[in-house]
Image (cartoon, rainbow, N blue to C red):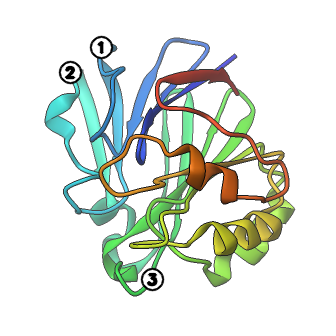
Amino acid sequence: MAKLTYQGHGSLRFVSNGGMVLYLDPFAGQGYDLPADLILVTHDHHDHNRVDLVTQKPGCEILTFREALAGGEYHSFVRGDFSIRAVPAANQNHDPACCVGFLIEVDGKKVYAAGDTSITEAMAGFAALGLDWALLPIDGVYNMDPKEASRAAALIGAAHSVPIHMKPGALFDEAMAAQFDGPGKTVLRAGQTVEL
């Protein structure tokens, strides 16, 4: 079964059952020891694009919002064990032309990695996808606060709704996580690994 490691802040690592390694928004925490097959970057802010932290296998591909939004359209990609679809992400701090979230499917599990965003119109359609995991920012500074993120979780209807990107400068914040109350609430602490 695929595994997800929450490295902290907005940084995530996925490892498929077949051993393929995907990093999303590398910046924070530990767990960069496994060489990457694929790196996803939701947007170009400094706390989401430290690809230099990641050892890359030969042929490692980096897919950023630029590729995901090429030609002004949201694109899909199949790379080995991972199927990836870019989806809208935006708020007053994040231009929708320069920011995406990703729907990631691996080993039969469906994950929504929201990137930096507030509630988007697209989220209303996500419940029909039967998502297993939704990873939602809750800092209330650059993104949704816990209350809005809880509403987003209700719209999305994932089996597990995980608060991330909780406080500027922090890998994880217990008080912020406690304020999130979306359906399927699942709290992952920095450095924690779970089976998807």
Which residue type carries mark 1? Asp
Q: Nearer the viewer, residue 13 or 70?
A: 13
Percent position of residue 36, x then y: 32, 24
Query: Mark 1, residues whose alpha carbon is within 10 Å: few (<14), some, or many (≥20)?
Result: few
Q: Which residue is mark 1?
A: 33
Disc 2 packing (10 Å; few <14; some 14–19; many ≥20): some
User: Residue lying furthest front in this view?
Assistant: 175
Question: Residue 112: in sight, yes or no?
Answer: no
Question: Which quadrant holds the N terminus?
Answer: top right
Are the residues flagged by discs 2 and 1 in contact, CB closer than 8 Å? yes
Q: Are marks 2 and 3 in contact (CB under 8 Å)?
A: no
Q: Residue at x 44, y 76 (%)?
A: 73
Identify the disc placed on residue 55. 2
> How many marks on residues?
3
Residue 167 placement (x, y as % from top left): 42, 56
Question: For the residue carrying disc 3, how many other residues have a C-alpha within 10 Å: few (<14), some (14-19), or many (20+)?
Answer: some
* Mark 2 → mark 3, Cα distance in angstroms: 32 Å
Image x and y of residue 120, in percent:
61, 80
Task: Determine whether the residue tagged by mark 3 lies in a helix, strand or loop.
Answer: loop
Residue at mark 3: 91
Question: In this rendering, would 66 be left or right of 77?
Answer: left
Checking the image for residue 51, the label placed there is none
Near-viewer residue (43 or 19): 43
- Is tag 2's residue or tag 3's residue first in the polypeptide sequence? 2
Residue 127: x and y, percent?
Answer: 83, 64
- Label 3 vs 1, first from the N-terminus: 1
Q: Is residue 173 left or right of residue 153?
A: left
State whether residue 163 is above or below residue 8. below
Any part of residue 71 in sight: yes
Quadrant that contains the C terminus: top right
Mark 2 or mark 1, whichever is nearer to me: 1
